[in-house]
Image: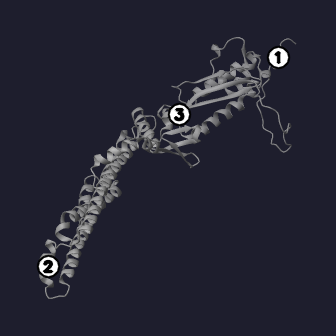
Amino acid sequence: MTNTHLQELIAPWFEKVPDANFLSSITATAIGVCSLLILYLFTRRLMLPGIQKVVTKLSPERIGALSPMLTKLNKRIAGLLCCVLFLATFDSVYPVNELAAEILKTVGQALLIIYVGFIISSIVSIAGAIYNQLEFAREVPIQGLIQVVKLITFIVCGILIVSIVLEKSPTYILSGFGAIAAVTLLVFKDTILGFVASIQIAANRLVTYGDWIQVENYGADGEVIDLGLNTVKVRNWDNTITTIPTYMLVAGSFKNWRGMQESGGRRIKRSLNIDMNSICLVGDEFRKQINAAIALHEYIRITTLPDPVSNLGLFRRYAEGYLKQHSKINTSLTLMVRELQPLNHGLPIEFYCFSEDKRWISYEHLQAEIMDHLLAVLPIFGLRAYQSVSGQLSPPTNTPQIDKPSIKVPNNAGQDPQQ
């Protein structure tokens, strides 16, 4: 064991003490350790927090939101400075033998590389957080790219640490990767696919935070809360979390409701099945009866009606006029009432329009309101909704009686025209 410069300086203090060399080496080591501790506490508790407070005052809202990340960065910078001081003063402060010196230097160098990797990781995280504060960050997420940079950083740090421990050049370590390339590709298959998928997702703006997506193969139906390198997390509407491999969003198909959320309305597409036996031609007297019951003239221009006209034709025109005057329907988008192909369970009449309010609850309430009204006015037009009869055929005796408008349907309604 060789004497260090610091040990030689304090050796005169222990000239008259037994085991002076041992005591001087212990004292020198203690001074070195205390200096590292003082440096860590000074930078960790005073210098770096002071700099952070000054920077935070420049923009309390934006930089203040980064406070946890900045605190973590401060710890890592303090550790890095201690590693630098330890390696810079090792030969002059710590009196140890050659084997111990080699081990301690190797450990110090490895810690230095680890702290450098963590600091780069913190800087990348802070840069990503700053980017997420920008307006267009939700449209072009870079979480996957951030994770790739961190992964590459730690791979490089791992290679450097292995080269230090083995006392070999990093190029020597890298040359060995060629032999295990197949194994590496197999192990990091999902990571590589996720990296490529993240680039495609960001470039094509396929998915971003807050998007409502549906992936039927994985049972996902909800809002995207995390876009990672390997996985995408979706919070379903029942508050469960579904995890989807990132590359599956590119390799497979999914439905993104962002277009609906950014458009002028949410589509309403519902239908009623009309009993075809209740469809018939009507005359002026029948129109007058309907007009007296529901003010038909407010929704239909009588002059535009064909002659003769069916009660179903009147109902379709009434339903379309009702939707056009509804305050919660966006009339600038497609709006129509149409007949579909007749089926064995009636003639479907489809109502196609768009709700101005795209929120789920309001949208469902509006759909129910429209369908309730149109079902209620069917008897006024002499029409019946088709439904399969099952269970109890007659209403319970305690059912309250409701007054219905008395509309006289033409005698030929529901009859076979050949009779």
Cα distance in 3D space between marks 2 and 1: 122 Å
**Upstream in sequence: badge 2 or badge 3:** 2
The secondary element bearing badge 3 is classed as loop
Residue position for label 1: 412
In the displayed structure, 19 sits above or below 388; it is: below
**Upstream in sequence: badge 2 or badge 1:** 2
State the image coordinates of residue 312 (x, y, percent, origin top left).
71, 20
The secondary element bearing badge 1 is classed as loop
Q: Which mark is residue 252?
A: 3
Q: Residues within 10 Å of mark 3 (few under 14, many from 20)?
A: few
Q: Residue at x 84, y 45 (%)?
A: 398
Q: Are marks 2 and 1 in contact (CB under 8 Å)?
A: no
Q: What residue type is labelled 2?
A: Ile
Which one is in front, 399 or 107?
Answer: 107
In the displayed structure, 415 sits above or below 131; it is: above
In the displayed structure, 2 sits above or below 387; it is: below
Residue position for label 2: 10
Which one is in front, 99 or 407?
Answer: 99
Which one is in front, 243 or 83?
Answer: 83
Is residue 149 left or right of 9 when viewed as pictured? right
